[in-house]
Structures are given as C-alpha cells and as structure tokens.
C-alpha cells in the first residue's frame, strides 16, 4: 500500500488514512464556499475548455455551482434534483441524479453518499501539484462508469479537496480546482433557490414527467 509523506511533516499516512481524513473533514462541514475552476481536456483538441465561478455547499444535500465565465449558468443540486439554468438561452433543464453520480463523481465526494472505500480502490499517486503540502490519491471505481480513475489532491492541513481530475475513457479528462475555500460560514437560504424569468423554456427529463 505504501505511505504518503506531507512536505514538512514527520507523520506519514497511508492512502486509506488520507481518504478517511478527507471523509472526516467533509462530514464535519456545515457549509462550504469556494472559487472553482473547471477544465475539460479533449483528446482531439489541444486547448482545454475552461469555466469558473463560485461553489456553495450546505449539508446535507444543497449545492450551487455559479458559473461566471466564459458564460453565465447555474447548476443547482437539491436533494437529488439537478437544475441547469442557461440565462442567455432562457432555458432550464431539470433531471434526477442517477445513483451512480450521487455516489461517485464530484457530487459523491461532497455529499459523502457512500464511503470512498466502498466505491473506489484507493492507491497512492504522484502527479504535478498546484501547490505544496498536499496528499495525492488515485481512486479507481469498483464499477465501470464514465471514467477510468480519479486523481485527487487533498490539503494536508484541512484535509479538504483542492483538486479532482477525472480520467475518462478515450483519453479525455475533466478537472476541478478549488481555491479561497471558506467553511462553516452562513449562506443565505435564497442561494439554493432558482428563479427563472417568464417565458423561460423548461425541459424535464422523462423521470420527472412520470
């Protein structure tokens, strides 16, 4: 299994211990705010697609991704329901989150739906870090899905997520980077409400129509 040694620390941790520390840190949250950058690297395109904005999370199951650039949009998760609002297109799509997505993917890490060890094989990893003082893990899904593995960079002091890289089939990858993280600060309830203008097109998936 091996151990992971933080820069400036004499106390190594195993990959399983690092994953458990991440889960403990997430469980201890009431709220979280952060700046995020989201990148998509395609195997067929040289330059990545870059997006960014603010993330708001409140236990147990409220999450808002407020995209500011390059275009405004809102991704709102509330108790298993996802709403995606595109202001410039005046379009709102609503759908239920699949069980697999709620247990894995980026949602699964924040929601803590299942223990990481139940969803992934946990290994040590080494990849270029954005900053020092972090622990790196490789998480390999036990069930085949949209990605082959997940690389995570965890802050060695707070044990919260700094970076998550989803390696997809075919060579593409999705990456999330988190900065300016603030925890347990008050978040106004209206943050997790979504009001759309009159005339907005609303598209529901088949499950919501039943």
Image (cartoon, grey):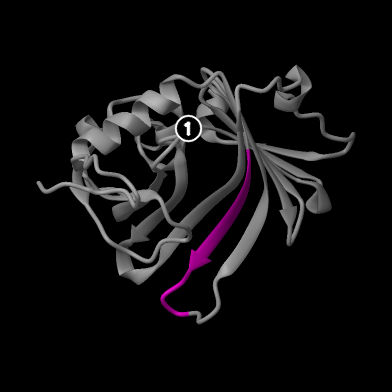
Residue at the image position 22 percent from the left and 48 percent from the top: 4
Secondary structure, magenta segment, majority class: strand
Q: Secondary structure at mark 1?
A: loop
Question: In this rendering, would 34 be left or right of 129?
Answer: right
Question: In this rendering, would 122 be left or right of 172?
Answer: left
Q: Is residue 42 magenta?
A: yes
Start and end of the magenta stretch? 34-44
Q: Is residue 198 magenta?
A: no
Q: What is the quadrant of residue 93 in the picture?
A: top right
Q: Residue furthest right?
A: 198
Q: Measuring from the top left, give residue 185's x and y in whole percent.
A: 67, 23
Q: Measuring from the top left, give residue 129's x and y in whole percent.
A: 41, 61
Q: Is residue 112 visible?
A: no
Q: Measuring from the top left, give residue 45's x and y in whole percent.
A: 50, 79
Total marks drawn?
A: 1
- Which is nearer the eye, 136 or 71? 136
Residue at the image position 61 percent from the left and 64 percent from the top: 50
Question: In this rendering, would 135 be left or right of 202?
Answer: left
- Which is nearer the eye, 85 or 162? 162
Residue ID for mark 1: 97
Question: In this rendering, would 145 be left or right of 160?
Answer: left
Q: Is residue 67 visible?
A: yes
- Which is nearer the eye, 160 or 50? 160
Q: Measuring from the top left, give residue 124's x and y in whole percent.
A: 21, 51
- Which is nearer the eye, 32 or 38? 32
Q: Residue furthest left?
A: 1
Residue at the image position 88 percent from the left and 38 percent from the top: 199
Whether residue 172 is situated above or below residue 53 in the rendered picture:
below
| Mark 1 Cα shell of 10 Å, populated few (<14), some (14-19), many (≥20) | some
Q: What is the quadrant of residue 30 in the picture?
A: top right
């Amino acid at each position: 299994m091996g151990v992971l040694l933080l820069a400036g620390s004499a106390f190594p941790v195993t990959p399983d211990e690092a994953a458990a520390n991440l889960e403990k840190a997430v469980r201890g949250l009431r709220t979280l705010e952060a700046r995020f950058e989201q990148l998509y690297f395609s195997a067929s395109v040289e330059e990545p697609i870059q997006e960014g904005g603010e993330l708001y999370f409140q236990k147990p199951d409220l999450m808002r991704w407020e995209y500011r650039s390059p275009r405004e949009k809102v991704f709102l998760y509330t108790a298993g329901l996802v709403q995606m609002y595109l202001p410039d297109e005046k379009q709102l799509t609503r759908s239920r989150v699949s069980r697999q997505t709620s247990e894995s993917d980026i949602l699964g890490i924040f929601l803590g739906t299942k223990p990481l060890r139940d969803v992934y094989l946990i290994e040590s990893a080494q990849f270029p870090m954005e900053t020092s003082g972090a622990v790196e893990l490789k998480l390999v899904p036990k069930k085949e899905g949209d990605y082959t593995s997940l690389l995570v960079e965890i802050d060695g002091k707070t044990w919260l997520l700094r970076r998550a890289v989803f390696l997809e089939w075919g060579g593409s990858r999705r990456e999330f980077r988190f900065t300016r993280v603030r925890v347990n600060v008050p978040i106004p309830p209206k943050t997790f409400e979504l009001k759309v203008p009159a005339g907005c097109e609303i598209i529901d998936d088949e499950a919501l129509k039943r």
